[in-house]
Amino acid sequence: MYLLTILLFSYVQMSRQIQKTAASDKDVLSNPRLLSVQGTLNVVMNQNVSLSCHSDSGSPPVRYTLFKDSQKISTLTRPDLTPGLFNLTINSASDTGEYKCKAENNGGGKYSNSLNFTLKEPVSTPVLSSPTSQAKKGQNVTLSCLSENGSLPITYIFFKGRQSISTPVKMQKREAAVIFLFINSSSDFGIYKCRAENSFRNNTKYSNSFNFTLAEERSHSQALIISLGVILLLFIIGFALAIPFFIIPSYKAKKLQSARPSTALTSTMNAEESENDVIYTEIDPVKPEEEYANFSVIGREDEKGNLEDPHGLELTENRCTKF
């Protein structure tokens, strides 16, 4: 009897525990799911997005809280098991972090999966360029295509006219796509373009047009003319340098030598005088402050000590005449 009482008590306790556990399991919420209402996580700047947080089972009411990078953003309560909707606006790249939600009731709380938005930016018009705009036949050249703005990765394709001349080049970094070309004939001097696109829908941009021009090849005669021109230029430069160092000093020296005063003896002879009676005239240098000439006459003296010429003329020894 005692054993039967113990067994009956144990059965009652077990039944109560089972009922309590069942009631407790009914109150506990299932793990919530966080979803994007738009169905995509690719967003653009200033786009409005909606996130849904929902627990399929659990005792209402349910309180939902949205977190971004472990920071609480918003909280709302549902009286039943309908989803909690959170509306957001993506204003910058910082709004594309990790999102989670938490569902809570009287039985406790649980966290959802995480979501990360990807900010999509349309590509800007690419720029097609080359290190050289001139080429000649038989030369290797390069073309570069780059979009300064746009979400990565960006895919580039090169064209000549309307025909593609490269396979798609996908760039994971903000770097230019480059192709190498061989100029083989005049047909290779056509118009080139490139195209850029990314995952942003309906956004494809074409670059500017680029065209190589034929470089003129210099002939031997042109090279000779250039060489002669260089030699002539060097000669002119050398002559110009010689003027202040050699020609001008030499000219000044000659001019100074010709400007110096000189003293000379001149002789005059009257045609009627004898060959032995010669009159010499001495011309003194002209001083700047005096303009005089001194004449000295050589002749015979008479008995009185006077000078006379061979023909009996009286002569004066010194005579000064002002000019």
Image (cartoon, rainbow, N blue to C red):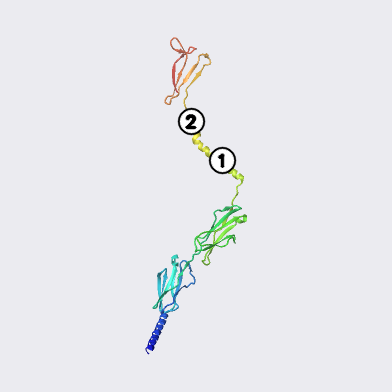
> From the image, which quarter does the N terminus lie in?
bottom left
Tell how many labels. Answer: 2
Residue 5 horizontal side relative to residue 48, left or right: left
Instruction: Kindly identify the amino acid type of the residue bearing the numbered disc 2.
Output: Ala
The percent coordinates of residue 146 (x first, y second) are 52, 59
Q: Which numbered marker is on residue 253?
A: 2
- Residue bearing mark 1: 231
Whether label 2 touches label 1, CB < 8 Å: no
Examine the image and state in which quarter residue 79 appears.
bottom left
Q: Is residue 63 visible?
A: no
Q: Nearer the viewer, residue 313 or 223?
A: 223
The percent coordinates of residue 59 (x first, y second) are 41, 80
Q: Residue furthest left?
A: 2
Callout 1: 10 Å neighbours few (<14), some, many (20+)? few
Is residue 142 shown above or below 249? below
Examine the image and state in which quarter residue 157 appears.
bottom right
Report, in whole angstroms, how far the alpha carbon at label 2 lies from the one at label 1. 32 Å
Q: Nearer the viewer, residue 230 or 65?
A: 65
